[in-house]
Image (tube, rainbow, N blue to C red):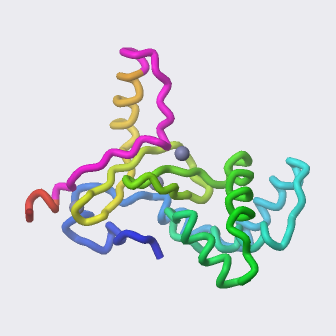
Amino acid sequence: MSSYPDPTSSAAAGSVLAPDPFQQAAGEAGSPALCAAVRDRLREGGLRWTPQRRALIEVLAETDGHVTTAELVERCRERDPATIPSTVYRTLDMLEDLGVVRHCHRPDGREEYHVLPEHEHGHLYCRACGGCWELERDESDRIVGMLERGQGFAVDLSHVTIVGRCRACRETG
Ligand SMILES: [Zn+2]
Ligand SMILES: [Zn+2]
Ligand SMILES: [Zn+2]
C-alpha cells in the first residue's frame, strides 16, 4: 500500500491529472519476472545473488510503484525479522546503479522508490489531499528546456517534485 491515497480512487482528483503510470507498471510486474531480470543484471555486474537481496527484490516486485525506504525495511522485516536496515539501503543503492529502481523525494524529503521506471519523470504532490501525479512529458520538457537554455543547467528530472494544491482541492477548498 502506498502511504498516500491512490489518485485513481478519487474521481475528483483523478478527473484532470493522469495517475502516475509507474504505479500501474510496477503493479503489473510479476515477482518471478522481475527477480529473473534483476538476477541477470546482478550477474552481469559481477554481484552475488543473496537471500537478502532476493527478499528485497521480491518486496519491490509487490509494491504498487512508489514506496518509501522505511516501508521497504518494514516489509522485509515481515519476511525476515533479522533484516538489517543498512543492508536494505545498500542494496537499494546497488539496484539504482543497475537501473532497477529510481528514487524521487516526497515533499518532506523522504526518498521514494519506483521499480523499473521506463523514463525519467517529475511529480506533482498535492499538500491538501496527498495525491501524487506524474508530470506530463511535454510539461517536463518545457521546464527542463527552459532551465537548460536560460541557466545552462541540466535538470535531474526524477528529483523534480512540485508541491501545491490539485484542481479538485482548489475547487472544493
Ligand atoms: Zn535523491
Ligand atoms: Zn488535492
Ligand atoms: Zn512516479
Residue 15 on image: x %, y %:
22, 62
Judge left or right: residue 42 versus residue 64: right
Residue 158 on image: x %, y %:
49, 43
The total of numbered circles placed on residues is 0
Residue depicted at x 71% and y 67%: 57
Q: Which residues are magenta?
A: 148-167
Q: Quadrant of residue 139?
A: top left
Residue 113 on image: x %, y %:
55, 58
Q: Is residue 164 in the magenta section? A: yes
Residue depicted at x 67% and y 50%: 96
Give the vertical position of 153 relative to 3 (above or below): above
Give the vertical position of 159 relative to 53 (above or below): above
Which image quarter has ligand 1? top right
Is the C terminus in the top left, top right, bottom left or bottom right quadrant?
bottom left
Judge left or right: residue 113 versus residue 148: right
Judge left or right: residue 136 versus residue 63: left
Residue depicted at x 35% and y 59%: 132
Residue depicted at x 74% and y 63%: 87
Q: Is residue 119 in the magenta section? A: no
Q: Relative to the observer, which residue lies in front, 154 or 118?
A: 154
Q: Relative to the observer, which residue lies in front, 47 or 65?
A: 47
Give the vertical position of 85 relative to 117 (above or below): below
